[in-house]
Amino acid sequence: MTDETHPSTDASLENETPRWQTRLIIRLIPALAAFTLFVAPAAAQSSGQAFCNTDMAQTIQNVFTIIQFGGPMLGGVLALGATVGLPFVRRSDWKKELKEIRNQGLVWGVIVAPLGTQILSFILNNVVAGGNACAF
């Protein structure tokens, strides 16, 4: 018997990763993910007051103001406009659309926008590291 090997077999063996390296990589990925997720918030605990003076904190407060006051205002205008326009429309499909606009304006403007603002402020104040220093 001759000891002949094919070049394609040799090349495929050289490019294979040993099993122990693959297992090591598979075990390191969750450890690195846990390190990234759990150590970074703990390191950010001391920088809460510094965050409050940044442009990002001001932007978040501006977005809250827009959601808190703009959402109900826009929803109220849509609901009121649809309610006022309803008696002047004769076609039943347009009436159905106006009723849907009225209902969606009330739901999103009166219920969802203020509730969303409260939920976001709770998350930023209690869940995000350093967020309670800003009092969003």
Image (cartoon, rainbow, N blue to C red):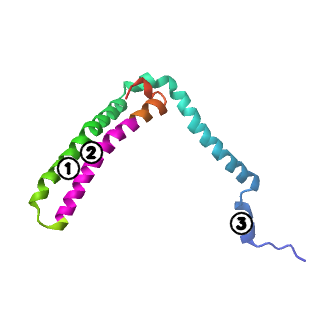
Q: Which amino acid does label 2 sit on?
A: Gly
Distance CA(mark 1)–CA(mark 2): 9 Å
Q: Residue at x 62, y 41 (%)?
A: 32
Determine the residue located farthest toward the bottom in the rendered image. 1
Up/down of 98 relative to 9, above or below: above
**Secondary structure, magenta segment, majority class:** helix
**Residue on which disc 3 sits:** 12
Which of the two labelled residues, at mark 1 and mark 2, occupies the earlier sequence position? 1
**Position of residue 103 in the picture relative to residue 80 (left or right):** right
What residue sits 9% from the left and 59% below the top? 88
Classify residue 88 as left or right of residue 116.
left
Which of discs 2 and 3 lies nearer the camera? The answer is: 2
Q: How far apart are marks 2 and 3 (CA)?
A: 63 Å
Q: Residues within 10 Å of mark 3 (few under 14, many from 20)?
A: few
Q: Nearer the viewer, residue 16 or 102?
A: 102
Magenta-colored span: 94-120
Which part of the image, by quadrant, shows the C terminus?
A: top left
Disc 2 target residue:
109
Mark 3: which secondary structure? helix
**Residue at coordinates 16% horizontally, 48% vertically from top-left?**
80
Horizontally, is 15 left or right of 96 in the view?
A: right
- 87 displayed left or right of 32: left
74 or 5, which is in the foreground?
74
Q: Identify the amino acid type marked 1.
A: Ala
Residue type beneath disc 3: Ser
Residue at the spot of label 1: 79
